[in-house]
Amino acid sequence: MIDTGLSGKVVLVTGADGGIGEATARAFAAQGARVAVHHHDGGVPAPEGVSFEHRLGDAEAAARAVVNISTDAAQCFPGQVGYGSSKAALEAFTRAAAVELGPAGIRVNAVAPGPVQTGWMSGELVESLLPHLPLGRVGRPSDIADAVVFLASGQASWLTGQVIKVSGGHH
């Protein structure tokens, strides 16, 4: 097993009430990280091994890695102009923040997921996507979570300003 260096580290995961955010919180917890989550408070219980905390002390809040979530459709998303352009802006923010925060030892990267089944895709939609997915399946939230954990880990200590496409080869 690779030592991610995340054991005992404090990690803040936003949007952790389901899908990719929940899988990410679980993945960090499995690495021994102290996971604080921010989510839409709709009475959703915390994922197993994760506590919902909304305040971190100043010393704990000092980030050394930021991982944003974009989409592989950020450059062209017909029918979803607002969503696609907001994610393209997030990617530009990621690159700029990496340059600005790098001298302080803070790495900033992003993950751009391809089609991930978080409950929103019908069986028909999934079937229509399969010919465009070289790995033969749509993504799982855990696929994205694993990439986020890697980018936050010491294994990615010289990666910053990158947008990593995690899409099963989807273009």
Image (spheres, rainbow, N blue to C red):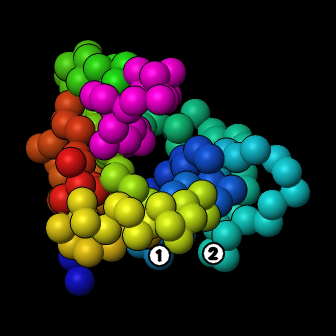
* Residue 73 among magenta residues: yes
Instruction: Name the secondary structure under disc 2.
Output: loop
Task: Please indicate, yes or no, whether residue 35 appears anywhere in the rendered image.
Answer: no
Tell me the residue that label 1 is attached to: 30
- Label 1 amino acid? Ala
Task: Please indicate, yes or no, whether residue 41 appears anywhere in the rendered image.
Answer: yes
Instruction: Give the camera-side residue of 164 and 45.
Output: 164
- In the picture, measured across the screen, residue 158 lies left or right of residue 56, that is left
Q: Please rate how many residues cluster around mark 1, counting C-alpha atoms within 10 Å: few if below 14, some from 14 to 19, many from 20.
A: some
The residue that appears at 59% across and 44% down in the rendered structure is 14
Q: CA distance from mark 1 to mark 2?
A: 8 Å
- Label 2 amino acid? Gly
Range shown magenta: 65-85
Q: How many marks?
A: 2
The residue that appears at 41% across and 21% down in the rendered structure is 85
Relative height, residue 94 to residue 29 (above, below): above
The residue that appears at 18% across and 67% down in the rendered structure is 134
Instruction: Give the camera-side residue of 89 and 73.
Output: 73
Are discs 1 and 2 less than 8 Å apart at CB? yes
Relative height, residue 37 to residue 163 (above, below): below
